[in-house]
Amino acid sequence: MRIIVTGASGLLGSQIYAAFKNTEHTVLGLAHSRATGELQKLDLLDSKEVEKVFADFNPEWVIHCAAERRPDVAEKNPDGTRKLNVEIPLHLAQLSKSLKYTLIYISTDYVFDGTSPPYTPGALTNPVNLYGQTKRDGELAVLGVSDARAVVLRVPVLYGPTPNNTDSAVNILLDIVADQSGKTYKMDHYATRFPTGVVDIADFLVRLATLPPSRQIPPILHYSASEPFTKYEMCLIFARILGVPHSHIIPDAEAPKGDAATSRPRDCQLYTRETEDLMEGYGGLGWTPFEEWWVDYLNKRQ
């Protein structure tokens, strides 16, 4: 299979690119600001160049990871965020009609408001911030292109190997826990997250690509680990793994205050039974427990 991965320098895209490179598939990794090594530099807003690159490569799958994924940044640049999270996916879905590829659009649990989990793939969306709105609108855009082959894959907050811990809302907690300078941090102990490893998602997508035609992939899939943590609870795990005190991290169980644009939903647990059924006999979900992954990863880095 010939596969294009957009956002192939990012937290998720880099692992998807690496996972498919380790198979018999032919893979093209696209990046923009961090196009290094084998990755090809491409501005996805340049529609003509996108069409040329895609037509030349002639993919069977396009896994679209490129996005503005930071809620606070999205709020400060709504127009730019809509271009990245809505207009580009729409163009890729339209292009899939002529080039006959399947578009896998990476979306988020933040399309839900967090008031009535767990959420099935068919549950009504109701995002509470601009980031979630643009990702929801991106979903509607790609699924609304008639005769396009599009699959929405929703995932929760992500962690995994990355050069900079700031690339992940989970990884960055490691730096906070390790900061023993005397500075204190208030840490969210209100919202429940389901942190999920990008290595596991990449492995899942490789297995998804091996499904026989009789296993029809539904238009919306959920992939998530099933362990619930607040950010504060994640910090406690990191403190235990690192063997450092955590008294400088203060739990904050109050609902966050602020305008709706930058608010976070309380619990957007994704219901994954449909995905489990789809992958029966092909490894299931195959997610790794949070603490187990971090112990192994940090031991290897020493």
Image (cartoon, rainbow, N blue to C red):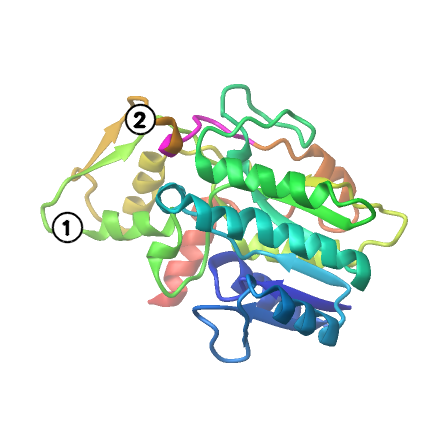
**Mark toward the start of the polypeptide (1 vs 2):** 1
Residue occupying the far bottom of the picture = 37
Quadrant in the rendering for residue 95 = bottom right
Residue type at numbered disc 2: Pro
As measured in the structure, the alpha-carbon distance from the residue carrying label 1 to the one carrying label 2 is: 26 Å
Q: How many marks?
A: 2
Q: In the image, 21: left or right of 209?
A: left
Looking at the image, residue 10 lies above or below residue 233: below
Disc number lying in front (1 or 2): 2
Q: Is residue 268 magenta?
A: yes
Marker disc for residue 256? 2
Residue occupying the far top of the picture = 116
Residue type at numbered disc 1: Gln
Residue occupying the far left of the picture = 182
Q: Residue at x 67, y 32 (%)?
A: 121
Mark 1 neighbour class, 10 Å CA radius: few under 14, some 14 to 19, many 20 or more: some
Q: Residue at x 48, y 61 (%)?
A: 10
Residue 242 x/y as whole percent: 28, 52
Residue 264 x/y as whole percent: 40, 31
Please indicate, yes or no, whether residue 107 appears anywhere in the rendered image: yes
The span picked out in magenta is: 262-269
Q: Is residue 274 magenta?
A: no
Marker disc for residue 180? 1
Looking at the image, residue 274 lies above or below residue 255: below
Please indicate, yes or no, whether residue 287 appears anywhere in the rendered image: no
Is disc 1 placed on a helix, strand or loop?
Answer: loop
Quadrant in the rendering for residue 4 = bottom right
Looking at the image, residue 258 lies above or below residue 214: above
